[in-house]
Each structure stands twice: as C-alpha cells, then as structure tokens.
Image (cartoon, rainbow, N blue to C red):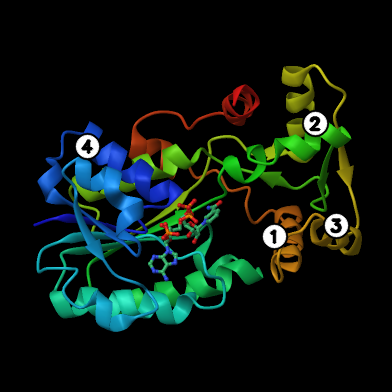
Amino acid sequence: MSLVITGATGHLGRLVIDGLLAAQVPAHQIAAVVRDKEKAADLTARGVEVRVADYSAPETLAGVFAAGDRVLLISGSEIGQRVAQHQAVIDAARAAGVALLAYTSVLGGPAADFQLAAEHQVTERAILDSGLPYALLRNGWYHENYTANLAPVLEHGAVVASAGEGRVASAARADYAAAAVAVLTGEGHENTTYELSGDVAWSFTEYAAEVARQSGQEISYANVPAEQHQAILTSAGLPEPLPAILVDVDAAIERGLLAGTSGDLARLIGRPTTPVAEAIAEALRS
Ligand SMILES: NC(=O)c1ccc[n+]([C@@H]2O[C@H](COP(=O)([O-])OP(=O)(O)OC[C@H]3O[C@@H](n4cnc5c(N)ncnc54)[C@H](OP(=O)(O)O)[C@@H]3O)[C@@H](O)[C@H]2O)c1
C-alpha cells in the first residue's frame, strides 16, 4: 500500500510530501504523481517513488495507482479543463481499486455558487458516483493568495478588492497540507467531508490594517466596484479569464461564502490554524 500524491510538484503537493516524511512515513511508501519528472528530481533524491502521468492523457494514468493505495487527488490548475482531467484520475483510481480517494475541493462544496467552484462540484459528484471510499477536503482560501501579492499593495499603499466588508477565513497552505497528511495517515476518514478553513475570518479592512502595522506604511483598503476591479486585474497582466473569475470570487466573499469557520481544519491538524498575521510577516521577510 502506498500513499499517492498527485500534483506532487505543486506548492501544496510538496508540503504534503514534506509532512508525510516528517510524520515518519517511510519514503518508499510515498508515491508522487507528476507530469514532469525533472521537476521531481529532489523527490526522487529523498527516496520518494515518482510516477509520471498527465491528467489530460488518461492512458498515462493507467498503472499509477494500485489496489489498497490511499490517494490524494490535488485538483488541477488548468481552469476549464479540470472536469475531464479529474474524471480521468477518478477512473484510474477506480480501475485500480484504491482504498481511499481524497480530493482537494472547495469550501462549501455544492453551496459554493461562484464560477471557480463549478469544476469542484462536478468532481465531487464524480467521486461519489465512483463508489470509491472518499474524503472530500473542502479547502477554503490560502493566506498566500493574498500575501503572495504584497509588492503592489506596498507600492500603491492599498489593498484593492471588490468584496465590501465580506470576510475570508483563510489558512496557510501548510495547514491544508497538514490536514491532508492527517487524512492519509489516520484511520476512519472514509466517506467523510471536511469544511476546511482558518479559525478566524478577517475583512479586507482588517487585512490592510495588519499589513500597515507590520510594514510601518500607510495602507488602506480600496473597495472598488466590480468592473473597475476587473479592469485593474486585467491591466496588471492577469491572463483571461482570471480577472472575471477573481472578481466573481470577491462577490462570493461579500456574500459570506468563504467566511465559514467550522473548526474542522484545526481539529484535523490538532492545533489552531496559522493566523494571517503570521503569513503577512513571512511574506514581508521574503
Ligand atoms: N484554496 C485555495 O486558495 C487555492 C488557491 C489556488 C489553487 N487552488 C487549487 O488547489 C490546487 C493545489 O494548489 P497549489 O497551490 O499546490 O497549486 P499549484 O502549485 O499550481 O499546483 C498544481 C499542481 O497540479 C499539477 N497539474 C496541473 N495540471 C496537471 C495535469 N494536466 N496533469 C498533471 N498534473 C497537473 C501541477 O503540475 P506541475 O507542477 O507540473 O505544474 C502542480 O503540481 C490547485 O491546483 C488549485 O486547483 C486552491
């Protein structure tokens, strides 16, 4: 039996593998599914078995899973292609007879009525229809979605969003990775759904105030209309269709869809989630 991580060369996948190794899972019991073997050279060097497959090429997925494996399907990053891609992974997992298929879904699952959630909802349905033992890890937002973009915030003295006074219960990517490790290495997670989010939901006003406090600069929250926000994101160079998708996310934040604080994440990882202030501090240091 192996613990198999897809998307293993991505940000989350690497943290999951780090977490498994830190939890004393022997490297030879960990398999990394990657589409670029060279990018995984460091994983091979650590003794992790690297299996090459592309979500978009179902034939490459035949044989990457074995009966009894516990699999973490990390959702793909190619928006618009993910339903077929995830279906191909689910089909391969089903053909192999894996013992658990965990999937990184979206907070709220079927209740998440924004564009970015649609492919996750179809994937969840496909997993349920497969009949495989599953664990739906409905991940809320990463702190890093925001803290990775501090340079323009510091340059312009503004956190630009169109989310009104909506709140975001984000957590560190490492917190979500720790949850995945807990599910893969623990017992009794079959056929469960977790609503994973940070312990604290913050507003953009509070976020701007914290960046200001830590940086010593004047930073305010610029709550702009949706059309203006989309134009700003487009002029900043975000590729289509991302600007419209991110503005749609902000509208969902304003409606409270990413503010849920169920406590599932802290319970799974056995500690409080990382405060956003810590992620801001880390981003300012780097
Ligand atoms: N909750 C949130 O706030 C949030 C934010 C952003 C994304 N997400 C979702 O969570 C996932 C994991 O987050 P992340 O930060 O780790 O993203 P990431 O760094 O972009 O990682 C995505 C992983 O998916 C792999 N992948 C993409 N297309 C693939 C394909 N066709 N075949 C095989 N592998 C493929 C990538 O492979 P390569 O390494 O070869 O590129 C990468 O390893 C994302 O893909 C996205 O679905 C969630």
Report the amino acid beneath label 1: Val
Q: Are marks 3 and 4 in contact (CB under 8 Å)?
A: no
> At numbered mark 4, what does the secondary structure look like: helix, strand or loop?
helix
**Residue 21, numbered circle:** 4
As displayed, is residue 230 above or below residue 272?
A: below
Does any portion of residue 128 appear in the rendered image? Answer: no
Q: Earlier in the sequence, mark 1 or mark 2?
A: 2
Q: CA distance from mark 1 to mark 3?
A: 12 Å
Q: CA distance from mark 1 to mark 2?
A: 23 Å
| Crowding at mark 4 (Cα within 10 Å: few <14, some 14-19, many 20+) | some
Q: Sequence-wise, which precedes: disc 1 or disc 3? A: 3
Please identify, in this view, whether the residue under mark 3 or under mark 2 is nearer the observer. 2
Please name whichever residue, 77 or 126, is drawn nearer the observer in this view of the structure.
77
Which mark is in front, 1 or 2? 2
Of residues 217 and 42, the one nearer the viewer is: 42
| In this rendering, the label closer to the viewer, 1 or 4 | 4
At label 3, counting other C-alpha atoms closer than 10 Å, the crowd grade (few under 14, some 14-19, many 20 or more) is many
Along the line of sight, the residue nearer the viewer: 157 or 134? 157
Q: Are marks 3 and 2 in contact (CB under 8 Å)?
A: no
Sequence-earlier tag: 3 or 4: 4
Residue 210 in the image: above or below residue 148: above
Pointer 1 residue: 249
In this rendered view, identify the residue nearer to me: 201 or 248.
248
How far apart, in angstroms, are the residues tagged by discs 3 and 2? 18 Å
**Residue 255 location in percent, x, y?**
73, 57
Report the residue marked by disc 2: 154
Residue 29, horizontal then vertical, whole percent: 12, 49
Q: Are marks 2 and 4 in contact (CB under 8 Å)?
A: no
